Amino acid sequence: MIDLASYIDHTILKPEADENDVERVCREALEYGFASVCVNPCYVKLAYSILKDSPVKVCTVVGFPLGASMTAVKAYEAEEAIKNGAQEIDMVLNIGALKGGNIEYVKKDIETVANVCKGKALLKVIIETCLLNDEEKIQACEAAKLAGADFVKTSTGFSKAGATEEDVALMKKVVGKDMGVKASGGIRDLNTALAMIEAGATRIGTSSSVKIINEFNEKNI
C-alpha cells in the first residue's frame, strides 16, 4: 500500500490566505502526515512555529509566480526564508530567458539559489510546463540538473494550465533517478494524484490534499 500522504506538499499560496488559513493547513498536515506545507514567504515563521517539532517540512516559494525577479532577489528570498525556518524552496526559473534561448542565464539563476540552499534546504525548480514546448522543457530540466537543484516541478498553479502525465514522464526521463519530480497545478482528486505518481512524480503539490487522502482512505488502496 502506497503512503500517499508522504508524497504531498499541502499547499496554500492564494494571495488572500491569512494567518488562520495557514494555521489550519499546518494542523491538517500534522494530522494527515503530509511531506510539507507550502506557504508564501511571509508565513514561513508562522508555519515553522507550528511544525518545528514534527516531521512535516516547511516549504515556500521564490521568484513566484512569474520567475522574472532578478537573481540576487531570488537568492535573498531563499536566504531569508531559510533563516525563518524553510526547509524546502520552490523557485520559478526565468521563463522568458529560457524561451529566448539564454540557457546559461537560466542555469546561473538556478545555481545561485542552489548555492544558498546547499546543505540547508531542498531546492525545487518550477519550469511552468504549460508555457514551454517539449524541447524547452528538456532544456529547463537539464539546466536545473546541472545547476544542482534537487527537484524539477511542473507548474506554479497560477498560469494557464497545470501538470500533465506526459510532462511528468518527460521530466522524469530527463532528470533520472537522482532528482525528484513534483507535479502541481490542477491536482484536485485521487485519480489525478495517482496518475501523476504512476507517470514518475515523487511529490505532489495540491491544495486539495485532505480531499485526496480521504478518497484514498475510503478506497483502502
Image (cartoon, rainbow, N blue to C red):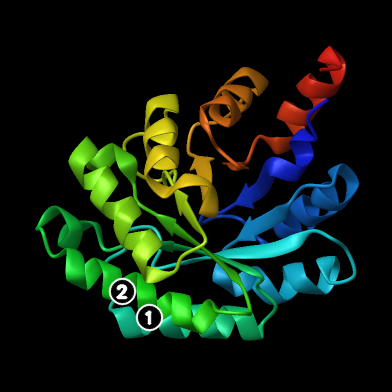
Q: Please report contact status of discs 1 and 2: CB closer than 8 Å, yes or no.
A: yes
Vertical placement of 119 versus 214: above or below? below
Please give the label number shown on residue 109. Answer: 2
The answer to whether any part of residue 162 appears in the image is no
> Does 90 appear above or below 69?
above
Q: Left or right of 141: which side holds 62?
A: right
Q: Is residue 199 visible?
A: yes
For image coordinates 71% across by 58% down, the residue present is 22
Residue closest to the eye, 107 or 175? 175
Residue 93 in the image: state x and y as whole percent: 32, 62
Q: Secondary structure at mark 1?
A: helix
Q: Which mark is residue 112?
A: 1
Q: SS for tag 2?
A: helix
Q: CA distance from mark 1 to mark 2?
A: 5 Å
Quadrant housing residue 42? bottom right
Location of the C terminus by quadrant is top right
Q: Is residue 50 above or below residue 74?
A: above
Amino acid type, mark 2 = Asp
- In the current view of this chain or complex, which residue is farthest to the top? 219
Residue 200 locus on image (x, y percent)? 53, 34
Q: Residues within 10 Å of mark 2 (few under 14, many from 20)?
A: many
- Residue ranking furthest to the front: 177
Identify which residue is drawn at 75% across, 51% down.
25
| Residue drawn at x 76%, y 72% as measured from the top left | 48
Quarter containing the N terminus: top right
